[in-house]
Amino acid sequence: AKILIDKIKKIKITFDKEADEKDQLYGSISKKEIIEYLLEKEIKVKSDDILIKNQIKSIGEHKIEISPYDNITEEISIIINKN
C-alpha cells in the first residue's frame, strides 16, 4: 500500500474540463474518472479507496483522500484546468 501511495504522489492528477464563465464545471469529477486516470498510469485503486469530501465542480486545485489499506491514508491534489 505504501508503494501505491508513493506512485500516486509522484504523478500530477490533472483534468481539462469545460466550464462556464464563473469556472464552474458542467458536471463534477467522479471517482470513476480518477480511477481511469490512475489506470492509464498503471496504478490500480478501487472506488472504496477514494474519498472525495467535497464534490469537484470547479476549476482549480482540489483535495481527495486515497486509502488503499486500513490506517494508511494520503491526501492527494487534483488539478482541474479550463478546457
Image (spheres, rainbow, N blue to C red):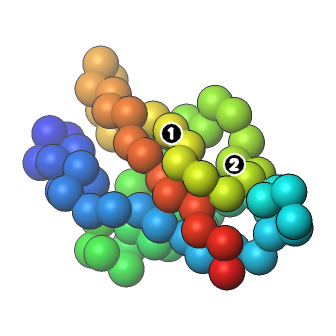
**Percent x, y for residue 32?**
61, 63
Mark 2 secondary-structure assignment: strand
Residue indicated by mark 1: 64
Residue indicated by mark 2: 56
Label 2 neighbour load within 10 Å: few <14, some 14-19, many 20+: many
Residue at mark 1 to residue at mark 2: CA–CA distance:
9 Å
60 horizontally vs 57: left or right: left
Q: Could you tell me which residue is drawn at 61 percent across and 38 percent down?
A: 52
74 horizontally vs 56: left or right: left
**Percent x, y for residue 82?**
66, 72
Q: Could you tell me which residue is drawn at 69 percent across and 34 percent down?
A: 54
Q: Amino acid at mark 2?
A: Ile
Residue 70 visible? The answer is yes
If the image is split into quadrants, where does the C terminus sit?
bottom right
Q: Amino acid at mark 1?
A: Ile
Work out which residue is located at the far front of the displayed protein and give it.
21
Vertical comparison of 5 with 10: above or below: above
Which is more toward the observer, 13 or 37?
13
Quarter assignment of residue 68: top left
Vertical comparison of 1 with 57: above or below: above
Q: Is the residue under label 2 in contact with that under label 1 (CB below 8 Å)?
A: yes
Which is more toward the observer, 81 or 43?
81
